[in-house]
Amino acid sequence: MPPKDPCQKQACEIQKCLQANNYMESKCQAVIQELRKCCAQYPKGRSVVCSGFEKEEEENLTLKSALK
């Protein structure tokens, strides 16, 4: 059995929040921030649910480099 994802709980909270708020991300910013905090505590690749944030960060860095 694979180890439990350390940020799974926060990911589930985001899903609950989005469902409760008609998928309006703006209403779930606090919960999303909690997931970001959790993801920041672990090395890249440790949490599957954080992979979207990691990809977003890489894209932002690439964009910033291209603008210089």
Image (cartoon, rainbow, N blue to C red):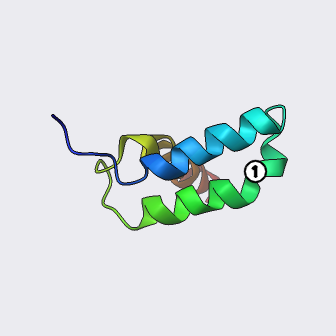
Which residue corresponds to the image point at 74% horizontal and 33% vertical from the top-left?
19
**Is 52 in front, or is 19?**
19
For residue 17, which quarter of the picture?
top right
Q: Does residue 42 sit above or below 11 in this rendering?
A: below
Picture coordinates of residue 61 (x, y %)? 52, 55
Which residue corresponds to the image point at 66% horizontal and 56% vertical from the top-left?
31
Query: What residue type is disc 1 on?
Result: Cys
Q: Does residue 1 sit above or below 66 in this rendering?
A: above
Picture coordinates of residue 35 (x, y %)? 54, 56
Residue 22 visible here: yes
**Is 21 in front, or is 53?**
21
| Crowd rating for badge 1 (residues with CA inside 10 Å; few <14, some 14–19, many 20+) | some
Which residue corresponds to the image point at 55% horizontal and 59% vertical from the top-left?
36
Q: Which residue is mark 1?
A: 28
Which residue corresponds to the image point at 79% horizontal and 33% vertical from the top-left?
23
| SS at mark 1 in the image | helix
Asked if residue 24 lies left or right of residue 46, the reply is: right
Asked if residue 38 lies left or right of residue 13, the reply is: left
Picture coordinates of residue 12 (x, y %)? 55, 42
Asked if residue 53 lies left or right of residue 31, the reply is: left
For residue 51, which quarter of the picture?
top left
